[in-house]
Amino acid sequence: MTADAPRGVDAPVDAPPELVQLLTPEGERVEHPDYDIELTAEEVRSLYRDLVLVRRVDLEAVALQRQGELGIWASLLGQEAAQIGSGRALTDADMVFPTYREHGVAWCRDVDPVKLLGLFRGVSNGGWDPAEHNFHLYTIVIGSQTLHAVGYAMGIQRDGAEAATIVYFGDGATSQGDVNESFIWASVFNAPIVFFCQNNQWAISEPLEKQSKIPLYKRASGFGFPGIRVDGNDVFACLAVTRRALQNAREGQGPTLIEAFTYRMGAHTTSDDPTRYRLADELEAWKLKDPIERVKAYLFKNQLADQEFFEKIDAEADALGKDVRSRCLALPDPPPGAIFDHVYAGDHPLLDEEREQYLTYLAGFER
């Protein structure tokens, strides 16, 4: 299968870049000579459940932010297949380095969604233990997690462990120096890492053509390792491609760059207004490629699920949404002085002085 050429590229293009696709937007199963996967009916139903529940958590979080209960939220709407497909390709030993939008991957790593909301509510600095879930804390600084991930992968390599690292970033992050530096280190040291770029085509308000004149996956060749573009709205293809790349990394074949070609259906974050910079027609066209609807169509067409199954999943999603909301609202606010905790491993004179000044200032408001 092929993808359309990137929008707005005025340089000559020989042919549209290859796009690995195993499930069409209409829910038709297609074959690929290099990337294929055999899934049982139960596995497909499980992937569908993941997609629906993760979207429900995301929609609840957006609603909570709009009601003033979260400071901000970065929605994954439209990118569920890229995250669930790649997340379900991981083994327990693999390590994940996310940005701030990988709520679906967090779901696959059994991170409580409420802990994600706690970060955006401002009551924690990231409420989960990375070592417990092999899922690092969210990274707000664009692209910096790629360097952390490469360093971790080099550690895996030196330990001789049967594991790999995967790091997530967006198309806009590929313009950052950190990302390109991480490509160099990973390539030169043949690190066991998968670079997973979710190309949702908008770096906040800047379109892809202002980031790159060539498809992003082709950049990998300049650093000496393979790149592949996958349909980021196809959970089957994302699972198959990521599973292969991770296995190659574990076997000592070095890094791979996966470009998941998808679309950000919502705003960059809840502080953003996408109607100011993109056309409604573009959004409507991508709605026809919805990652959940294509799996639902596949299940229906192949008689792998009935209406009762879909109703059960919808009911579970509603229950999950209510649970997430109630537990989010019940999160206790930390004491103001807690912001100074854990900055250093031990006491620090300057920090102690700043804490005392701050607490004294707050005490001045007490009656």
Image: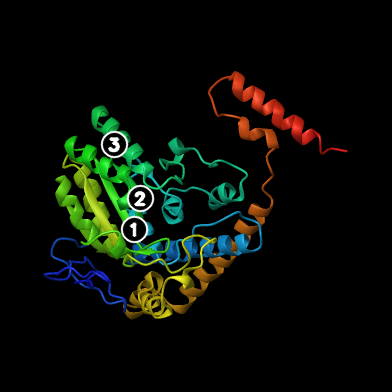
Q: Which residue is mark 2?
A: 168
Tell me the element at label 1.
strand
The number of numbered badges drawn on the structure is 3
Q: Earlier in the sequence, mark 1 or mark 3?
A: 3
Residue that appears at 43% across and 79% down: 280
Q: Amino acid at mark 3?
A: Ala
Which residue is at the front of the view, 300 or 64?
64
Dot 3 or dot 2: first in sequence order is: 3
Marks 1,3: beta carbons within 8 A: no
Return the disc, 2 or 1, that comes first in the chain's sequence. 2
Instruction: Name the foreground residue: 236 vs 140.
Output: 140
The answer to whether the residue labelled 2 contacts the one labelled 1, judged by CB atoms less than 8 Å apart, is yes
Task: Find disc 1 in the rendering and name its residue.
Answer: 198
**Residue at position x 33%, y 66% from top?**
262
- The picture quadrant where one finds residue 123 is top right
For residue 249, say whether it is visible: yes
The location of residue 216, given as percent across then percent down, is 24, 58
Residue receiving disc 3: 153
Residue type, label 2: Tyr
Question: Which amino acid type corresponds to the residue marked 1 in the rendered image?
Answer: Gln
Vertical arrangement, residue 55 with respect to residue 337, above or below: below
Residue 347 percent location from the top left of the image? 59, 19
